Amino acid sequence: MPRKLAIFMPILALGLPLDQVTKVLVQLTLPLGSQVPLISGLLNLVHIRNKGAAFGLLSGWSAEYAWLFFVATTGLVLGVLGYLLWRLPDDHWPAALGYSLILTGALGNLIDRVRLGEVVDFIDVYWGRYHWPAFNVADSLVCVGTAILVWVIIRDEKTADASNSV
């Protein structure tokens, strides 16, 4: 089995169920719009729905148009990232890790969009009165995967610059 597949499959097998189970648990245990403090002054468990993109962007669009747009663009992104992962040389395991996390997170939120027409968010991080937009496990996977890919790009640029020095 190629190394990139050995990275992708466990992330998908663990990340997708974790994302979906946590969202279902929130839906079953917390009324929509409610919150439960977990760490006073820092972290709440909430139940909100995001009809828009990341951080609620585009949430004012009509439901049908937004659903079609987000399902289509997420499908396109999944296709492009899947292709990039497939084309990735087997020794680029950090990039495979980043792609795998992003793919899994995007798929988790796509399932919500297809199933519910919106995404369930439940993690509310804040400091005083300043709140980060609520998010979920899938969003976390996408952010961590993106950070890994940024690190890979920076690392590879530095390596290329060092090898091209005079």
Image: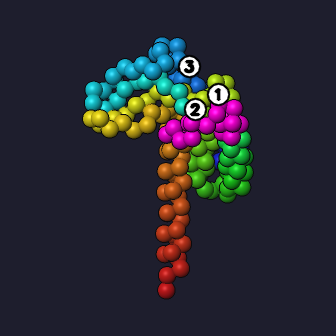
Residue highlighted by disc 2: 51
Res. 68 in view: yes
In the rendered view, tell whether residue 106 sits above or below residue 34: below
- Residue 130, image x and y in percent? 32, 38
What amino acid type is highlighted by mark number 3? Answer: Val
Residue highlighted by disc 3: 24
Q: Which residues are magenta?
A: 51-70
Q: Is residue 123 left or right of residue 68?
A: left
Quote the CA–CA distance across marks 3 and 1: 15 Å
Q: Which numbered dot is residue 77?
A: none
* Mark toward the start of the polypeptide (2 vs 3): 3
Instruction: Determine the secondary structure under disc 1.
Output: loop
In the rendered view, tell whether residue 55 sits above or below residue 147: above
- Residue 10, image x and y in percent? 61, 35
What amino acid type is highlighted by mark number 2? Answer: Lys
Residue highlighted by disc 1: 117
Quote the CA–CA distance across marks 2 and 3: 17 Å
Q: Residues within 10 Å of mark 3 (few under 14, many from 20)?
A: few
- Residue 1, image x and y in percent? 71, 44
Q: Residue at x 49, y 40 (%)?
A: 55
Look at the numbered discs 3 and 1 and tell me whether their residues touch, using CB distance below 8 Å: no
- Residue 58, image x and y in percent? 57, 41
Q: Residue at x 58, y 25 (%)?
A: 20
Front residue of this view, candidates 126 and 143 = 126
Q: Quadrant of residue 9?
A: top right
Look at the numbered discs 2 and 1 and tell me whether their residues touch, using CB distance below 8 Å: yes
Instruction: Determine the secondary structure under disc 2.
Output: loop
Instruction: Determine the secondary structure under disc 3.
Output: helix
Q: Quadrant of residue 70?
A: top right
In the rendered view, tell whether residue 160 sits above or below residue 147: below
What amino acid type is highlighted by mark number 1? Answer: Gly
* Mark toward the start of the polypeptide (2 vs 1): 2
